[in-house]
Image (cartoon, rainbow, N blue to C red):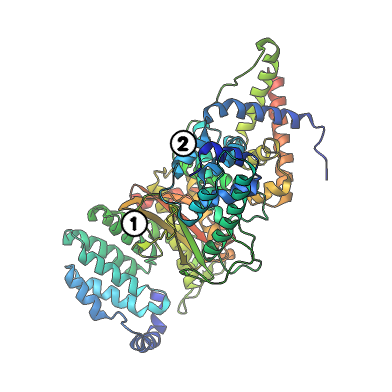
Amino acid sequence: MTLDARDPMDELLRETLRQDVAAAAVSLGRLEERVMESLGERLPKRGILGNLKALAAPTRGGRWGQLAVVGATAAAFLLAGTLLSDRLPFGRHKEPLLLGAVPAAATKSVASRSSAENGVLFILPALNARVVSVVGSFSEWEPVPLSDDDEDGIWTTEIPLPPGRYEYAFIIDGRWWGQDPSADEYIRSFGEYSSVRYVGGGGDGA
Amino acid sequence: MSTEEDDGIVYRTQDEVSLLRASLEGETAAWGEIVMRYKDAVFGLCLGFLRNRADAEDITHDAFIRAYVNLRRYNLERKFSTWVFTIAANLCRNRLRYRRNHPVMEVDFELEGSADPARTVAREERQVRVRTALNSLPYAYRTPLVLRFYNDLSYKEIGDILTIPEGTVKTRIHRGKAMLKEMLDKERDSS
Amino acid sequence: MRGCRPIALVAALACIAALGIAAAAVTLDDFARVLAAIPIVNEARVMAAFELGLKSSCCGFPVDETYRLLERLAAVPGSAADKEAIVLAITQAIEQGIPVDSLLNKAFEGLARAVPLAPLGQLLEQRLRLLLESRDLFYSRGIFRASPDASVAAGATALQPSQFDGLLSNFGDALGDYLESGGSPFEGQQIYDGVHERLTQLSGTVLTASDVDLVFSRIEPTDLTQVVLAALR
């Protein structure tokens, strides 16, 4: 194994790339604000979790307020873990330590959706939407409804799909939306975008 | 209901996992903090992959949306940066596939911010040559170089992100640098 | 579907027996009824094709999906002539032994998107031509669909029917997607890359790796330009 230390090309590359990005990033501006805007500045209803946190939020008084926040946050994510645990993908050999889960999560599944081994998660942020569904080659392009039970603006459904290639799009309050952020690929179909996912074959699911 | 400023003070002392958990609860301000921390790194990756500033901005934005949406499935055992970079790399790949049929001019942006024009001219010229050479490398060779020399990632991390074996990463980096040297030498010799 | 003919009789009997046990199975009468509802002029030809298709349901012909497409066609607004063009594209595919799955999918999508029926029909016809030309390419490169009553020459390879159909379906569909994205027929390498990407993603799951490798070992980018140009003629 050769060391690539001390190769002047390395430093040149680093320098060049750093300069280039710094120059171009000027136009990035406050990207975080644009991202937050896309996700929604204020979620309409925070539900139990948000209100808990809000209740425990510190006033201008210091330590007790902060301790209350810590306590409330801990309680909040414990709650989040139990409520969200039924949304996690199943059937892996080793249970991954997922952000949305507490390892010793309750087994009671709230409104258990598909617990099929091959459940493919369709997930879309659509704040203030009334009806969200997915249509695709797995459903003869008939709508399959998504749900947002906790009203956090994230709509999901899980569909058991055998390995293969699937084309689909979302319909949000009657409007087609063909660019799923979680898709493997986009294609053009009838002049509009459709999303494509490959199931099976070792994708990382991100 | 707490004010944003109060939340801001609390957030800046929290570690990344707490920010992520808060994001999962729906605290978009926490996610905003995450975006701030990683946007340059992701943008640099996208710029290197796509060679076009506007596309890189788009994809950087989309990557953070997609990461947020998929946060529930983020595996804590995996480095967060690697996870976000993987999402960005996949989106870049998709964009390149689409772009194959809708060619976009790869915009050559100007270097900015040189403090002393006289002293930095030579360095700038060299960087322009390196950048031009780098941008003319094929995707398979350019991308591992970007991840290595901009994002400072290990061979293994690069392999994970590009879904190629670690050995291939090393070969591509080695070969990529050799090609760059060849291009730069050729250019120097002909000038 | 010619290859199924020798065993079709036995298989058909078995299928009919199985269909009799299965609840609400689609019969020829159902097809006749829905065709009349559309309505179809070329009824005899279409019925003959569907009869063939029903006999081949054991060889992968998607009976239920085809029937449901016809039901949808009958239900949507539009001229009978335009609807018949769509049915004829499917019919010709069956007659030619071309797998109809990708055509059905496009048709379902088009109906769901409320695409005007005349352009939908034309798109399906073009997709069918792409499939036919693709199959000719496979044949010319010695890649065939195994059948009990045909022997294959030395140097040629016969693939399992379901494998061949899957390869052909995805191959032709990928070409169609390429054209629809605005790609030029003359960019053979780009077409090749797109098809390669798709088949590779399916390799090891829906398609066997060796079959995918076989296709790409015998086909070149210039071939794809020819296929696409032929289909556009």
Task: Report the side of A76 relative to B101 (left or right).
Answer: right
Location of residue A112 in the rendering, given as x and y in whole percent from the top left corner: 48, 70
Regarding residue C20, the answer to whether it shows in the image is yes
Q: Nearer the viewer, mark 2 or mark 1?
A: 1
Regarding residue B49, the answer to whether it shows in the image is no
**Helix, strand or loop at disc 2?**
loop
The answer to which image quadrant residue C86 occupies is bottom left
Amino acid bearing label 2: Pro
Residue on which disc 1 sits: A131
Location of residue A36 in the rendering, given as x and y in whole percent from the top left corner: 48, 41
* Disc assigned to residue B99: none
Task: Give the CA separation, mark 2 to mark 1.
Answer: 36 Å
Task: Report the side of A83 relative to B128 (left or right).
Answer: left
Q: Chain of mark 1?
A: A
**Helix, strand or loop at disc 1?**
loop
Asked if badge 2 and badge 1 are on a common chain, one would say no
Write the residue at 38% across / 83% down.
C8
Residue on which disc 2 sits: B103
Location of residue A41 in the rendering, given as x and y in whole percent from the top left corner: 45, 41
In this rendering, the answer to whether A198 lies above or below B181 is below
